[in-house]
Amino acid sequence: MQFKYIKLEIFIPESHFKQLQDLLQKIDAGHIGNYDSCLSYSKVIGTWRPLEGTKPYIGEHNKISEEEEYKVEVTIKSENLKSTIEAIKSIHPYEEPVINAIPLLEVGL
């Protein structure tokens, strides 16, 4: 089954949210019907442990980090997945950004 839309979940520090929001608008992510710039975000707590050989944006090697960050959810057309991910990674401060792509059966039901 081909999915026309994908929901992206993007985890990003609050300091970079506005830059992400501007980027998503520029590349027309979050365009649903006669509305654009549609996204939602919420504060979450993320945890991770940078291993040897990494260059963490936040945290120290071999120590568990715990920080507030935003979980941003936005709907995109499936055909734009690769270019959207590349654009997000170009402004994301994390060495290994967490971006989940979830196929959607329908949007705006």
Image: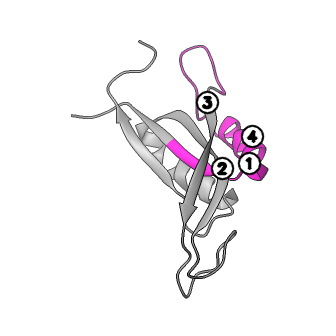
Q: Secondary structure at mark 1?
A: helix
Give the residue number, with chain letter if any, for mark 3: 39
Give the residue number, with chain letter if any, for mark 4: 22
Count of labels in the image: 4
Task: Please say whether residue 12 is one of the residues in the magenta stretch.
Answer: yes
Task: Please say whether residue 82 is one of the residues in the magenta stretch.
Answer: no
- Looking at the rendered image, the quarter that the C terminus falls into is top left
Earlier along the polypeptide chain: callout 2 or callout 4? Answer: 4
Give the residue number, with chain letter if any, for mark 2: 69
State the residue at coordinates (67%, 51%).
68
State the residue at coordinates (60%, 70%).
95
Question: Residues under labels 3 and 2: Cα distance?
Answer: 16 Å
Give the class, few, some or many, for how many residues have Cα within 10 Å of label 2's Cα (few <14, many ≥20): many
Earlier along the polypeptide chain: callout 3 or callout 2? Answer: 3
Give the residue number, with chain letter if any, for mark 1: 14
Which numbered disc, 2 or 4, marks the residue closer to the eye? 2
Q: Is residue 81 left or right of residue 86?
A: left
Magenta extent: 9-37
Amino acid at pointer 4: Asp
Give the class, few, some or many, for how many residues have Cα within 10 Å of label 1's Cα (few <14, many ≥20): some
Amino acid at pointer 3: Leu
Which numbered disc, 3 or 4, marks the residue closer to the eye? 3
